[in-house]
Image (tube, grey):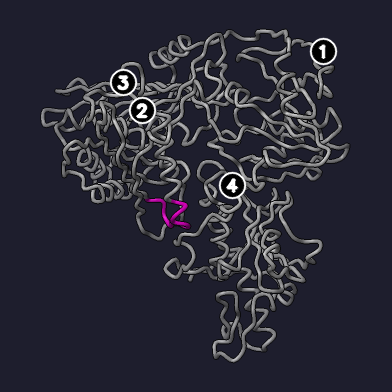
Amino acid sequence: MKKVKTQHNRRSFLKISAASGGGLLVGFSWFAGRAQENETIPEEWYRINGYIKLGSNNEVIIYSPNPEIGQNVRTSMPMIVAEELDIPWEQVTVEQAPLNTGFYQNQFSGGSLSIRLSWKALRMAGATAKHMLAQAAANEWGVELSQVKAEKGMVSEINGKRKSSYGDLAAKAVELQVPEEVELKNPKSFELIGTSQKNVDGSKIVSGQPLFGLDFHREGMKLAMVQHPPAFGMTVKSFNAEEIKKMNGVSDAFIIDTTIEEPSWSDERGYLQLIAIVGDSTWQLMNAKKALKVKWETLSPAENNKVHQTKLDQAIANGKAVDSREDGDVEAAFAKATKIIESEYTAPFLAHSTMEPMNFFANVTEDSAELIGPVQTPESLETSVSKLLDMPIENITVNMTRIGGGFGRRLYVHYGVEAAAISNHIKAPVKLFYSREDDMTQGTYRPAYKSVYKAGLDENNQLIAFSVKGAGLPEGPVFPDRYPAGAVENYSAHKINADTNITTGAWRAPRSNFTAGAEQAFIDEVAEAAGKDPIEFRLELFDRAKQNPVGKKYDYDAERYAGVLKLVKEKSGWGKPTPGIYRGVAAYFCHSTYVAEVFDIAMVDGAPKVKKVWAAVDCGIVVNKDSAKNIIEGGVIDGIGHAMYSHLDFENGKPQQENFNTYQLIRHHQAPEEIEVFFVENEIDPTGLGEPGLPPAIGALANALYQATGQRYYNQPFATAEQKSLG
């Protein structure tokens, strides 16, 4: 066991009656649903901090603190608490915690950080409760703490004479102080962590019960839609407000034009500038939007695809690097090389395409603001609304619904701020929602990228020089200290930013979602020029990084990186050709996790078809195996679809794709027929998992497509008029 210091030194149990204590603030309470099945509701609840609430009948509610965006943290995070609490999972009810910055830390979902940042706090919460329950029993029985043990929801004497349930002891534990330190389990003794548990919201999802922001309804609330400027670089001057207000079902229409100093959403837009229409039904509001006659003002030049290409070309040619690394003398090494390989890679702007469009509920009064909806960064929303309304943060509440897809889109909270601004204007509760077109044309896109890779081989086909220069609109994609940094004697990497008025933001695996595909496709091209097997070529570089690293410290663990390559090589049977099957491999490190993937492609009716994918993953301890597999499988499919099909084109500052009839996503028949996922078993604390499965999929796909078609794939989307889509 491992002893750790606790983070609280006051009484941590609060006695709460069943009438006053209970369910999720938004009304999405699993416990309420179970009560309908004639299960007993405890007469008393005893709450420990923000994570655990014990019932007198030995039922346990565990609060999941972070937003649920489909990564299954609402199941996995409570599993960690339950493991250390040592309570049978079937006795646990899971509920979503509200925003509470006074207790929870890192209460957001993004960067594949939910489990990684909360691992110790979640374990400590469970272990602290277990310790206090055991101490309560020891005190009651007049024995030393060492003479009792707590497990499976019961505390018993070592000699077996007496035992009590957690529920029986909860009232006594209320009176105890939090211990200064507690013991955590040895990972070898985990019984719940590492198993497969069903999604706690699963039955509600498949039966259509209210979970998501779009499901939320408050009696008497108004509905609202907004009209943003139709092109980037424009602002609204005036519109036919009086005409719109006279339409059936419309109660108000007005311009919101305000600025928030130091906005807390990280795409740096501190202004709200839009038209809001308020009414009674979605149909009436949509008709009102169609009747808008707006005078727009142009503030900055309208951009288009050609402008974006020119900006990227100029940045590559003349741009100043904002981050770089130089090992050895790259130019001298290129001059001596007997073979030079050089390739350019590009990728377009992308939308997030969340299944659930943007929406939020707000009820702003003179002295309070209540916010309910799907958001990845609730604290940022709270802070922004506080600035908008000039209202103390303690007067603002944020409650999180389940999120119907995030992928980084809901890190940016302007839609919640818009809802608060509308509610404040009309002095009534309101539910704001976007149409698909609103969301897809409003911005916060994945940046557009271009990178140039160059490698030099000597007369023995050894890699002696490697360089990469990458530019992005607005942020460059290069990670200078990642692979193959440290593995090549002469190495240079430069990250270059370029200006654009297109608003962008984090998109699943930021920057890595492009760099992995480009880098891993280029590595394959270099391996081919060297006459070496793609996996063996990569492993040679990892050996150099391990045994004789070049330059300053690099970001990755070469042993773990090589480990996933070796595992996927073994599991896929790499090196054993199968007639009609064309293979590609890629490996990548991001979010502190290592993933290697092998793709098998066959040509079916003249079109490539992904038959099978193998994925090897080193993410430390796996909390919920089925959930972890699902995340990797989803990342693979997401990577394939966006690399093959998705893109946003711009003309006169306006995106030309506004809905899924023109913005293509992967279809079911284009997904791999089979995906196998394998996890490296170790006792390393969990690292990121929501994003790392996507980036290598693009590289492995490009490499397999090359083997199948004889064509290199340099520009995304891969499916063009010249290059076929997947069968």
Q: Are marks 4 and 2 in contact (CB under 8 Å)?
A: no
Cα–Cα span, label 4 and label 2: 36 Å
Q: Nearer the viewer, mark 2 or mark 3?
A: 3
Q: Quadrant of residue 476?
A: top left
Q: Nearer the viewer, mark 4 or mark 2?
A: 4
Q: Which residues are magenta?
A: 618-628
Cα–Cα span, label 3 and label 4: 38 Å
Q: Disc 4 designates what residue? A: 68
Q: Could you say where residue 250 lies in the image, as x and y percent from the top left?
A: 81, 23
Task: Tell me the number on the disc at residue 723.
Answer: 3
Q: Could you say where residue 471 lies in the image, as x and y percent from the top left?
A: 43, 21
Cα–Cα span, label 4 and label 1: 41 Å
| In magenta segment, residue 16 | no
709 sits left or right of 283 in the view: left
Cα–Cα span, label 1 and label 2: 57 Å
Q: Earlier in the sequence, mark 4 or mark 2?
A: 4
Q: Amino acid at mark 2?
A: Ala
Q: Nearer the viewer, mark 4 or mark 1?
A: 1
Tag 1's secondary structure?
helix
Q: Earlier in the sequence, mark 3 or mark 4?
A: 4
Q: Amino acid at mark 4?
A: Glu
Q: Disc 1 designates what residue? A: 243
Tag 2's secondary structure?
strand
Q: Amino acid at mark 1?
A: Glu
